[in-house]
Amino acid sequence: MDRYLHPRLDIRWFAPYHPDSISRLRFRCHEGVEADEKRNQSVSGVTHVIKRVIGTVVVEDGIAPVRVEPDGRICHPIGRPVIQGASNVFGTQMPAQAVVQEKSVRLAPPEATVPNRIRWEYALPIVGLHLIALLAFVPWFFSWTGLIVMIVGIHVFGQAINLCYHRILTHRALKVPRWLEHGFVVMALCCMEDTPAKWVAMHRIHHKHSDHEDDPHSPLVAFLWGHLGWLVVKNRETHSLASYRKFAPDILKDPFYMKLEKSYAWVWIYIIHAVLFFAVGFGLGLAIDGTTAAGWQFGASLLVWGVFVRTIAVWHITWSVNSLTHLFGYQNYETSDHSRNNWFVAILTVGEGWHNNHHHDQASASNQHKWWELDITYYQIRILEWLGLATDVRRPRHQRHAARAVVATDQSVPADSGD
Ligand SMILES: [Zn+2]
Ligand SMILES: [Zn+2]
């Protein structure tokens, strides 16, 4: 190992791996690393020479980041050997054990994060609602109806996130009438998961930089970071109106969604829906039992279970797509990120857990690529389509290609040659 431990690393190492992308090398220095850039037209266009390596260096080769560790080892997030038989600047051969396996892959948080700047507008509701939801452990707040309303609510309100925020708004995998889209968005706001422009922008940034350093919520930084930490720490680049304008301009064009950005209507929508749950419970309790006490108890059970516990559950289910499915599971495709198909998350999210399939084919309305990778969200989209409420439903890539091939074949047949 010692023979390649030296304070200089030359990125020309990467040329044998992907010669075409050498001119697109992007190179970032972390704390404690000094580097300079040298133009070298004869070799690669740009050659970066790291003068002194103390921390971890991430080099992006146009496909995926590769990392040069302080001791000179080089690894790839998918665990693929990056340098095989290449030699470093001193001409020594890279040993096979230079490749670090995926378990040890770690990313630094995005450079734009400000570690000491807590976003209290996120931290307080997240902590506060978790504390309030603890009331579920007090027997007085329990009712079987409340429990069932919670379970059904996870699906119904969760679909506003999966189907609307993710597949309709972020990826435009289908279209629904404006009134239905807005209805879904109101339900999504009852999950307290950001306004549509913020959610969409963040998810598009995630796809653009998946598991690279600018990914706002890669769990390769840390599990808790990917799960919820990224929400409560300031990120100068992603948490700004400029980034919402850049990554979600289509969303902001809708006056309703723009109004949500400029007002606290989303807070009121959440509060009003919570009050409605309580009021309906109170009315039913009063009507069935005839006492005010029964009304209070039943209303409170619907509020705690049907609203607060359900909100927390939907949060963690959504967050698990960001955390678990970028860490655990299998891959059908070698994407440029760490996305995985995770059956547990797929069950919880009725289809979003087939995340490697999704990263491979983001435009598709369906995440089902094998017969047993059930995507209930997609079945619901097909029901909407059958009802005439969904149009332009984007089929999986293999079906799109097959359809295109049929069209091309049809067009290649002369009109007068048919029989
Ligand atoms: Zn992802
Ligand atoms: Zn997506």
Image (tube, rainbow, N blue to C red):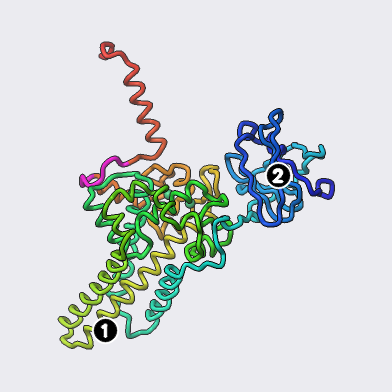
| Magenta stretch bounds | 386-393
269 on left or right of 233:
left
Residue furthest to the right: 3
In magenta stretch: residue 122: no
Mark 2 sits on what residue? Answer: 36
201 on left or right of 95:
left
In magenta stretch: residue 387: yes
Q: Pointer 2: residues within 10 angstroms few (<14), some, or many (20+)?
A: few
Mark 1 sits on what residue? Answer: 297
Whether residue 146 is visible: yes
Q: Find residue 95 and report its horizontal and vertical position in percent.
A: 78, 43
Residue occupying image coordinates x 23% and y 88%: 293
Q: Nearer the viewer, residue 68 or 116?
A: 116
Which-is-in-front pick, marks 1 and 2? 2
Q: Secondary structure at mark 2?
A: strand
Location of residue 204 with respect to 233 vertically, above or below: above
Residue occupying image coordinates x 74% and y 52%: 53
Main secondary-structure element of the magenta-colored stretch:
loop
190 on left or right of 332:
left
Location of residue 98 with respect to 230 vertically, above or below: above
The kind of residue on which mark 2 rests is: Asp
Location of residue 328 with respect to 247 vertically, above or below: below
Q: Pointer 1: residues within 10 angstroms few (<14), some, or many (20+)?
A: many
Whether residue 152 is visible: no
Location of residue 60 with respect to 275 vertically, above or below: above
